[in-house]
Amino acid sequence: MESDARSDGRNLLAAAVIGATATVAGRRIVARLTRGRFGDAEEYNAAKVTVSGPIVRKSGRPSPLSGPGGTTADDVVEQIEAADEDEDVEALVVELNTPGGEVLPSDDIRRAAAGFDGPTVAYATDTCASGGYWIASGCDELWARDASLVGSIGVVGSRPNAAGLADKLGISYEQFTAGEYKDAGVPLREIEEDEREYLQGIIDGYYDQFVETVSEGRDMDPGAIRETEARVYLGTDALEIGLVDELGTEDDVEDRLAELIDAEPEIREFTPERGLAERLGIGAERVAFAAGNGVASAFTSEGGEVDVELR
C-alpha cells in the first residue's frame, strides 16, 4: 500500500509538471498565433522605437547628402526617454533600417539607448549601416536577418566644387575672414592642399571616435573593426565576424525578449506626436528642399561648410 501511495504521488507530481509545461507552451503558442504587427500591443511590457531612413537632427532639416525625410534624432531620443520613464516598460527594441546619417544625432540616439534602464535589443531589418551601426553599439544585443546589410563603419565628408562654374559665369569670390581656416572648403574657389589635409584630419578624427565607440559598445578589437574598411556585410557574414550577435526574425527577437524579461513580451511602438501645423511645416520644407533649397544652402552657408555623415 505504501509503495502504491508513493507511486501515485510520483505520478501526480509528473502530471503536474507536464501540465505546467504544457500550459506555458500553450500560452506561448497562443500568443504567437494572436500577435499583431510588431509593436502594436495595447497592453505592453516592452517598447519599440524605429530608426528608418537617413538620420538627421531635426524634422524638416534635410541633409545635402541624404535628402529630405529620414529619422529625427530628437524625436527618437524623446521616445526612448518616455519608454524609460514608463513603469510598464521592462525592455526596449530599437528597430533599424537606415543607411546612416549625421554624426552627433546618431550618437544622441546611441546614448539614449545605452542609458535605458533595462535590456535593449537592436534589430536590423533591411539595412543597419554606418550611423545605424553607431546606434546599435549602444544596445545590449544586435540581431539581424540573413540578408540584412550590416556595417559600413566609416565616415564620409563632402563639399561641392563650383569653382569652374563660377569662372564660366564670371563670378569672382571674395570673403573676409579672421583665422586662416575659417573658409576652408568654400565651394567657389579651388581648395588648397593644406586645407584638404585639415578637413581630412576632421574626418579621420570622427572615424577614430566611431571605431572607439563600436569597440567599447560591442566589445570588439579596434584592429578588427578597422580591417572591415567600412564594408557592408550580409547578416550571415556579419555574424561570422562578430558584427551581430544573432540572426532571426521578429518572432525570434520576441522570444529573446521573453527570456530577458521572463514574461511573454507585449510590445508597444513609441512614436512622435506632431500636430497638424507641424506636419504641414515639415511637408513644406521637404518640398523646398526638392526644389533646390539644399543646393542653394551650400552657397549661402557661413564659411566653407563641409557636410560630414556616417554613411
Image (spheres, rainbow, N blue to C red):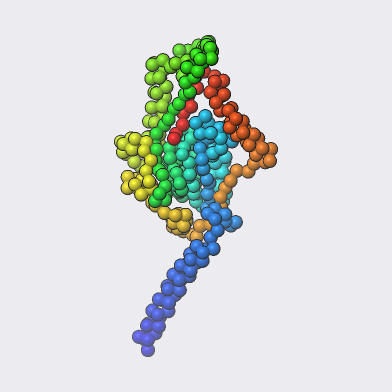
Q: Nearer the viewer, residue 190 or 311?
A: 190
> Which quadrant of the structure image shows residue 277?
top right
Is 217 situated above or below 92? Answer: above
Please state if 32 lies on the left or on the right of 222 as rendered.
right
Residue for point 38% across, 16% down: 193
Please state if 243 lies on the left or on the right of 40 as rendered.
left
Q: Is residue 105 visible?
A: no
Residue for point 41% across, 31% down: 155
Q: Position of residue 199 (x, y in %)?
A: 42, 22
Is 230 situated above or below 2? Answer: above
Q: Position of residue 29 (x, y in %)?
A: 48, 66
> Which quadrant of the structure image shows residue 80?
top right
User: What residue occupies the far front of the structure in this picture?
Assistant: 168
Residue for point 37% across, 82% down: 6
Residue for point 57% across, 24% down: 296
Q: Position of residue 111 (x, y in %)?
A: 48, 38
User: What residue occupies the far bottom of the structure in this picture?
Assistant: 1
Q: Is residue 190 visible?
A: yes
User: Which quadrant, please, contains the N terminus?
Assistant: bottom left
Q: Nearer the viewer, residue 83 or 68?
A: 68
